[in-house]
Amino acid sequence: MTAAGFAWRRLPTVDETTQRALAGVLIDCVAGGASVGFMHPLSAERARAFWRGVADGVARGERALLIAEDAAGPCGTVQLVLAQPENQPHRADLAKMLVHRRARRQGLGAALLRAAEAVARAEGRTLLVLDTIDGSDAERLYRRLGWQSCGRIPDYALMPHGGLAATHVFYKRLAPEAGPA
């Protein structure tokens, strides 16, 4: 699918070349201050190791990975964590939505989020949950696209360049995907 000069797709597998490219997106986001579980400076090896783990989860069907590309290559990504406890087969966690600084403020985040919601519906998921840094651009995006706040946790995580930050927890109910008539 495409949006504003970007093409996105769900990856059924994640090869080494894609892992290296996504490591570059992750490193850029952390360097730019995104609180996504890593501290600055993030080494290329640490970033590649993270994506190797994601690739393993995709191969096992535990994660859905979507990437967005522009003329320069991968510039955004989002994951759905599909592997949930036995009593929660109806939900998924939205994780690691990353947009390279070169692609920000062009609608890519919203396009990735909508794509993730569509994939979740196709996977039979009717509830998504996520957390994001309180007061961030991402928080504003989630609110704008209809996600509901269910609380704020103070001093939840360190920011990549230091200092504690609160996180905001959100959820979104999804209508089930309509089947053939």
Image (cartoon, rainbow, N blue to C red):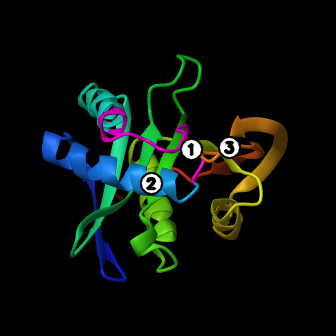
Residue occupied by mark 3 = 162
In the image, 16 versus 40, the foreground residue is: 40
Q: Secondary structure at mark 1?
A: loop
Name the residue tied to disc 1.
Answer: 126
Rendering coords of residue 137 (x, y %): 65, 66
Q: Is residue 77 above or below residue 106?
A: above
The structure residue drawn at horizontal position 58% and vertical position 25%, both measured from the top left corner, is: 88
- Looking at the image, is 18 positioned above or below residue 89? below
Image position of 1 (left or right of 106): left
Q: Are marks 2 and 3 in contact (CB under 8 Å)?
A: no
Q: Which residues are magenta?
A: 34-47
| Residue 54 image point, x, y percent | 34, 33
Verify whether residue 90 appears in magenta.
no
Dot 1 amino acid type? Thr
Q: Position of residue 6 (x, y in %)?
A: 31, 75
Q: Which residue is mark 2?
A: 116
| Label 3 packing within 10 angstroms: few (<14), some (14-19), many (20+) | few
Q: Judge by depth and name the residue closer to the eye, 41 or 101.
A: 41
Helix, strand or loop for disc 2: helix
Does the image show residue 52? yes
